[in-house]
Image (cartoon, rainbow, N blue to C red):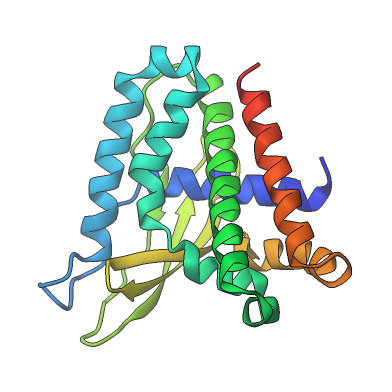
Amino acid sequence: MPANQTLIKNGLFLFILSLLFTSNSIAAANPSIEAPDVLLQKATVKMLRSINNHRSEIKQSPQKLNSLVEEIILPHLDFISASKMVMGKYWRRAEKSQKIKFIRQFRLLLLRFYSSALSEYLNGHDKNLREDLIRYFPINLKEGETSLTVRAEVQPDKGEAIPIRYRMHLTKKGWKIFDVSVEGISMITTYKNNFATQFKTQGIDALIASLEEKNKQMVADNNK
């Protein structure tokens, strides 16, 4: 696997773990909107219980883990904003149908990466997932604030802590994550750089077709 793809996979792997082990660290400024900490804490509890309760099913079928990730994790990600940032100037040039296709394939790509990374982690850990893997730094959510960065650290069993930065913003559907950085490496920036050459030399349709082929291959690999 190329170095940049390894970075992406590692980054998403830590991202999914950090989402699973979120702690209460953000104060709500608007009580009518569910605060980021409450939102993620609910996802944390639900995901932990689901994985621990369905461990045997997950081992037998990767599709079970895919369904859990799609049900519990993906609703907290803003794929439209992430897609806009990844496409950059090509988003403005794309037709509506191309934008829809790109968002769909990009979403599937992230789903497969998340599921594969989490599956890899679970295969090496038979015990129930730890709840103290992540340490979060306090953040005060100010009144009227619509975007923020949440700082955290992964606390592995061995080695140094790994810094993580979430970028979140307030949408009509509540707080959503649109980017995450692991050890200073941004998921959005990494994907944008990876796709830039294809956008320039092959065009939007060719890149979408390439993503579709990769997603099909990932599905085939998971079903082996």
Q: Quarter of the image containing the C terminus?
A: top right
Residue furthest right in the image? 201
Q: Is residue 172 above or below residue 34?
A: below
Of 40 and 204, nearer the camera is 204
Which is more toward the observer, 32 or 156?
32
Left-right relation of 146 to 13: left
The percent coordinates of residue 197 (x first, y second) are: 84, 67
Q: Closest to the observer: 140 or 87?
A: 87
Query: In x, y percent, where is residue 205?
Result: 74, 61
Q: Residue at x 48, y 67 (%)?
A: 80
Residue 173: where, in percent of width, then height?
A: 27, 67
* Residue 187, picture quadrant: bottom right
Res 132 visible:
no
Residue under the point 61% across and 20% down: 223
Outermost bottom residue:
144
Residue plotted at (46% across, 43% down): 17
What is the number of callouts on the image?
0
Task: Please indicate, yes or no, whether residue 37 appears anywhere in the rendered image.
Answer: yes
Whether residue 118 sits left or right of residue 70 in the image: it is: right
Task: Point out the image quarter for the N terminus.
Answer: top right
- State whether residue 147 is above or below residue 191: below
